Image (cartoon, rainbow, N blue to C red):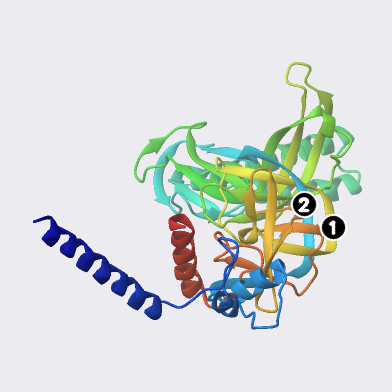
Amino acid sequence: MKTWTRIGVVLFASLAIASCSKMGDILPKSKPGKEGKASSSEKEGLGESKGEKLSKSERVERVQRSRPAVPVKVAIVEEGEITSSLVFDSVLETESSVEIFSESTGVILEVLVEEGDRVITGQVLARLENDVQQVDLDETKARYEHEKVNFQRRIDLYDRKLINQQEYDTAKFGLEQTRLRYERSRIQLENTIIRSTVDGVVTERIAQLGSRVSANRQLFAVMNLSELFANVHIPGQHLLRIEKGLSAIIDSDLIEGASYGAYVKLVSPIVDPESGTFKVKVAVAQGNGMPIYSGMFVNVRIIVDTRNNTALVPKAAIVHEGDLKYIYTVKAGKARKQLLQEGYSNVGYVQATSGIEKGDAVIVMGHNALKDGANVKIVADSVAAEGADGEAKSAAEG
């Protein structure tokens, strides 16, 4: 029994040795070396062939070059004007908002305007009945014409010394009294016509056709929109920077995209001791050509400094990393990351004070997951957006 056991062990060992010998023939033989060192075939994959040695930076660059290009959208840096502004919230007001009253008593026969209509000074807004006033005017006019003829006769008699000075003065006084009664009648007839006293927009119509009104009753309200302004309260440290005539811009919170030219009309020389601010009146310049109304909430930007011919970078190109701001430029098909040295800024652009010049291509889409030196390809907006999503996903998975 022991003999058969020994024979079985010897046969098993022989088969195992034969199997190992065959596996050794199949597997490639590697040169001895330190564990983790790249083989010649791996080096050739990085572009390093037999007899060629590359530095670490060169190998990294070749690896990056082999990666697919990231689709991006770029904007070309232009030179232009940019300003420094003080921005405040305010409400538009008007210098002139008037109430139109009736100066006569009577029934309203016509109403010629509605709320929202633009009117000019002297334009007829409504008419009252005027039969009585017309009769009075005709009567006083006839009496006045008669007295003028009589007075001319008195002048002839006076010149011929046929009447004395007292009779002449009495006749002259009577003529003047008749003229004044005629003028009063003419004014009373005119008062039955309701006119606008300012240029502006009808903001309220109280007058009702057919209703009877009395003197001193309000019929309309008219707002003068050519004299709109916004009051802002500015911290006292800016007192010496703000002066009458400075340019300003007023942006509407109510109407998207509505912007109006303006200027500093009045600067108060008094600083409020409680708030530490001083009051500035910013008037809307005429001729903006856009709808604008009193009571609108607005942003007031007072321009305190302007820089011309400076490099303007779109804000869409900025990448925030903590407190620092970076941008990516495209040079020779690669993304180059650089720190943004910024100056003034506005709604869409920021001033680059160094490192960026006119004509540089800055990435404005597809740059959120980029790395310095990455291969990029300039494409349209939609393609750049899709590429940016894919790059961000890859970065998250990695």
The secondary element bearing badge 2 is classed as: strand
Q: Is residue 347 left or right of residue 115?
A: right
Q: CA distance from mark 2 to mark 1?
A: 9 Å
* Residue type, numbered disc 2: Tyr
Q: Please tell me whether residue 276 is drawn above or below residue 24 in the rendered image.
A: above
Q: Position of residue 72 (x, y in %)?
A: 56, 72
What is the residue that sits farthest to the bottom in this orientation? 50
Q: Are marks 2 and 1 in contact (CB under 8 Å)?
A: yes
Which quadrant of the figure has residue 389?
A: bottom left
Q: Position of residue 154 (x, y in %)?
A: 80, 46
Residue sitting nearer the eye, 210 or 297: 297
Locate the N terminus by quadrant: bottom left
What is the residue that sits farthest to the top in this orientation? 274
Q: Where does label 1 land, which residue?
A: 307
The secondary element bearing badge 1 is classed as: strand
Residue at the image position 74 percent from the left and 55 percent from the top? 339
Residue at the image position 44 percent from the left and 66 percent from the top? 390
Residue sitting nearer the eye, 55 or 23: 23
Q: Which mark is residue 344?
A: 2
Residue at the image position 45 percent from the left and 32 percent from the top? 214
